[in-house]
């Protein structure tokens, strides 16, 4: 009886730990590829071919665009993060603000001045996300990009 109770307790503890770990995992985590066919016509020619994100439960984010060697590391609180690229782009920064677990609002800044911004929304049960982005001086020309998850969760 004691062995069964101990085994049940260990099993319950593991289940609770695993459930919490999964609950803390961001739906943004992983690699994503542009689906040009589902995106606004013409918008994808200027878009990144893919992204990789790591977002922690405490709001730390690592934002990568592997094709151009881009990386930005910081918080999802809207604070500007320096963008590093394989080919340096002095003065380039990115701010990301989480508006719940499924929505990110971002701005691209050059020398502290916003150049563009967008909203990224997880859709299709976490299998894709939509990026509606625009130049700050031409918000009426917003475009929609669709990215799909590379590996099934």
Image (cartoon, grey):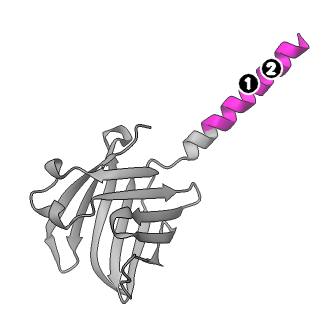
Q: CA distance from mark 1 to mark 2?
A: 6 Å
Q: Position of residue 28 (x, y in %)?
A: 43, 52
Q: Position of residue 85 (x, y in %)?
A: 40, 76
Quarter placement of the N terminus: top right
Look at the image and give the residue range highlighted in magenta.
Answer: 1-19
On screen, residue 138 versus residue 73, left or right, reads left
Q: Which residue is mark 2?
A: 7
Query: Magenta segment: does it hold 15?
Result: yes
Residue drawn at x 40%, y 37% as measured from the top left: 152
**Vertical arrangement, residue 12 with respect to residue 150, above or below:** above
Please tell me in which quadrant of the rendered image residue 78 appears.
bottom left
Q: Main secondary structure of the magenta part?
A: helix
**Vertical arrangement, residue 101 with respect to residue 10, above or below:** below
Could you tell me which secondary element the residue under label 2 belongs to?
A: helix
Residue drawn at x 84%, y 17% as measured from the top left: 5
Q: Which residue is mark 1?
A: 11
Q: Is residue 28 visible?
A: no
Furthest toward the top, the residue is: 1
For the residues bearing labels 1 and 2, Cβ distance under 8 angstroms: yes
Q: Position of residue 39 (x, y in %)?
A: 17, 53
């Amino acid at each position: 009886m004691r062995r069964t109770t101990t085994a049940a307790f260990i099993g319950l503890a593991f289940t609770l730990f695993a459930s919490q770990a999964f609950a803390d995992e961001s739906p943004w985590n992983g690699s994503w590829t542009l689906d040009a066919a589902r995106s606004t016509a013409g918008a994808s020619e200027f878009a990144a071919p893919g992204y990789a994100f790591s977002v922690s439960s405490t709001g730390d984010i690592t934002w990568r665009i592997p094709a151009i060697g881009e990386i930005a590391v910081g918080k999802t609180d809207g604070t500007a993060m320096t963008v590093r690229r394989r080919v340096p782009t002095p003065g380039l920064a990115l701010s990301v603000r989480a508006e719940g677990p499924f929505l990110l609002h971002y701005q691209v800044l050059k020398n502290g001045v916003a150049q563009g911004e967008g909203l990224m929304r997880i859709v299709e049960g976490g299998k894709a996300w939509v990026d509606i982005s625009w130049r700050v001086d031409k918000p009426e020309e917003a475009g929609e990009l669709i990215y799909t998850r590379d590996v099934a969760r």
